[in-house]
Image (spheres, helix red, strand yellow):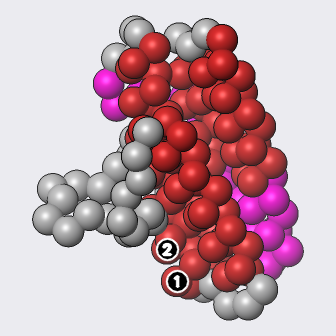
Amino acid sequence: MSTSRPTPSGPATPEVKALRDALDAEHAAVYGYGVAGGRLTGAARTQARTALDTHRARRDAIGRLIADRGAIAPAAAPAYTIPFPVDTPADATRLAVFLEEGVALHLGALVAAAGAPLREDAANWLRESAVWAVRWRGASTPFPGLPEAGASGTPTAGGRT
């Protein structure tokens, strides 16, 4: 999912930019988990609901952090582009991995841009997204939050339709 909207007004420090990008990724994750949850059942649906609640809480916290810095937080788009059809539980699981990887990339950038104590919060959020990705994928990656070497593109959350 990619973003195409203008940046809201307010201070444009690297930390605020990284917070806005992370917030946009969280907005997309909330939307995407709504899509994924519609194709899951049983324990997987419960897991998706818990992940959705986690992303909502993180989205709200990041929005407050942006406002605390005197900046304007980007609002959620009315809809986001889903990168592939989600017709089966396997597709929904793949979407959940995609969402967590996209959020982790933005949280990794926030860790790099943030000062203390926000850096610690961002690192904890990054860890949480990495754990969610492992739960969905069934395996870990060497460096969650960093793009893979030689990757042709990086999945990002946050695009509008």
Q: Relative to 52, is 129 on the left or the right?
A: left
Looking at the rendering, which quadrant does residue 148 occupy? bottom left
Q: Quadrant of the N terminus?
A: top left
Q: Give the residue type that dot 1 points to.
A: Ala
Q: Residue furthest bottom?
A: 115
The answer to whether mark 2 and mark 1 are in CB contact below 8 A is yes
- The image position of residue 143, as x and y in percent, is 39, 68
Q: Label 1: state its secondary structure.
A: helix
Instruction: From the image, tell me which residue sits under label 1.
Output: 112
Q: Secondary structure at mark 2?
A: helix
Q: Nearer the viewer, residue 123 or 158?
A: 123
User: Measured from the top left, where is residue 27 in percent x and y?
Assistant: 63, 44
At a point 74% along the width and 44% down the height, the residue shown is 54
In magenta segment, residue 71: yes
Q: Which residue is at a point 57% across and 74% down the rendered structure image? A: 110
The quadrant of the picture occupied by the C terminus is top left
Q: Which residues are magenta?
A: 60-84
Q: Position of residue 36 (x, y in %)?
A: 54, 22
Other-residue count near label 1 (Cα within 10 Å), few / some / many at <14 / 14–19 / ≥20: some
Q: Quadrant of residue 149?
A: bottom left
Residue at 57% x, 45% y is 132
Residue 69, labelled with which disc?
none
Q: Which mark is residue 109?
A: 2
Q: Amino acid at mark 2?
A: Ala
Is residue 150 visible in the rendered image? The answer is yes
